[in-house]
Image: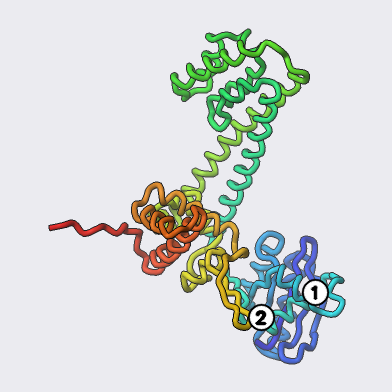
Amino acid sequence: MAIAVGIDVAKEFHWAEIKVADTGTVLASRRVENTPAAIQALIEDIAAAQAEHGPATAALDVLGGIAGLLEAMLLDAGVRLVHVPGLAVSRARRATSGGERKSDPKDARVIADQVRMRDDLRPVMRPMEHDVELRLLAGRRRELVTDQTRRLGRLRDLLTSIHPGLERAVDVTGKTGLWLLTRYVTPAQIRAAGRARLTNYLRKAGGLPATAITALVEAALEAAHAQRIAVPGETIAADLVRELATEALTARDRLKDIDARIEEALARHPDAALVRSLPGMGATLTAEFLAEAGGLTRFPTPDQLASAAGLAPVLKQSGKVRYLQRATAGNKALKRVFYQSAFCAIQRDPASRAYYARKRAEGKRHHQALISLARRRINVLHAMLRTRQAYCPRTEPTAA
């Protein structure tokens, strides 16, 4: 590498600094609009610097999103691209003279200097189309689930404030309870409707089990007859509950559509079947893993994958003191995938359950044993993807 290019990414425009790697001589430091023409002009500047001085390496502090066009055009032009995390840029800037002062040109200079000094920066590869699809779908699903969790929490709070008996009787995570709450909320409304009208209304939802309808109607009537007082603000609160219940039903349908699209995307992905063969890795967790990891190109060894997920112990050494401690950094999404899949596996996979039980017998707490199991499963998953073999549970030899 003879040329280092640091690019501070922003929404409206970027700032790029091109400098000679050996001497640090600045060849250019300028604003680059986030448009195809301006980015193409930057690529031509990099090409001119390469022609005069040698190969160039460019670095971004943001990947995807607002950097999507820039990243795609640089890769398409054949520019070697690496990622300098924003935290590294911030720490390196604060170590310079006047480090508390922040500006786009200064950040671009820091990024370029990181390229000059470091040889361990993560290379940025052109993402595969199926990986991008899964990343977008998995991200949208997380948004919907987060919004739904917040929505149902608010619904429960409002319902408890005016009709706590009904809140205890209704399961707002299911279609039956939500459908009831789209019309009948207050004790007076439920008493006035009666058993027959409540039953008929729930039947209109379609697909609800008769036993579930009967049980909910009886529980709702019992709660309504037990409360004869109208709480202040009941009318407005009931309207809000009905609105939230309607939104929750719509969100359930949207989640079903997203899940169906994720299944279609997984069917096209070359690694999905292998990953899903590992116990505990359902469609959602598989999609999130592939969206974050994108295959084994970034992680040649299972240790590197575990380190990226924050599941590898971290060495702390100073003088004669030396010890390992649990990592606090790493990709939180990857860590959650491995942790949740390990939790699911101990309920379904005998080998995972036996390993978990052995760790508990060694004195580890539940969380520690799960972390240990998740780390072990990374070795298994990495081997599966490396050898292109699906998971095969180990069978105990039978006695002759």
- The answer to which quarter of the image holds residue 150 is top right
Measure how far apart labels 2 and 1 are at the Cα level.
Answer: 24 Å
Asked if one can make out residue 338 in the rendered structure from this viewpoint, the answer is: no
- The answer to which quarter of the image holds residue 191 is top right
* Residue 165 vertical position relative to residue 80 in the rendered view, above or below: above
Q: Earlier in the sequence, mark 2 or mark 1?
A: 2
Q: Position of residue 221 (x, y in %)?
A: 57, 13
Q: Could you say which disc has been placed on residue 94 in the image?
A: 1
Question: Foreground residue, 59 or 212?
Answer: 212
Q: Residue at x 72, y 91 (%)?
A: 22
* Residue 55 vertical position relative to residue 310 in the rendered view, above or below: below
Asked if one can make out residue 67 in the rendered structure from this viewpoint, the answer is: yes
Question: Foreground residue, 95 or 39?
Answer: 95
Q: Amino acid at mark 1?
A: Arg
Q: What secondary structure is found at the residue carrying circle 1?
A: helix
From the image, state whether disc 2 or disc 1 is nearer to you. 1
Q: What secondary structure is found at the residue carrying circle 2?
A: strand
Q: Residue at x 36, y 51 (%)?
A: 349
Q: Which residue is mark 2?
A: 57
Q: Residue at x 44, y 20 (%)?
A: 211
Q: Residue at x 40, y 64 (%)?
A: 380
Q: Residues within 10 Å of mark 1 (few under 14, many from 20)?
A: some
* Residue 167 vertical position relative to residue 23 in the rendered view, above or below: above
- The answer to which quarter of the image holds residue 377 is bottom left
Q: Position of residue 57 (x, y in %)?
A: 66, 80
Q: Position of residue 118 (x, y in %)?
A: 66, 82
Q: Could you say which disc has been placed on residue 31 in the image?
A: none
Q: Position of residue 213 (x, y in %)?
A: 49, 19
User: Left or right: 291 with respect to 68?
Assistant: left
Q: Amino acid at mark 2?
A: Thr
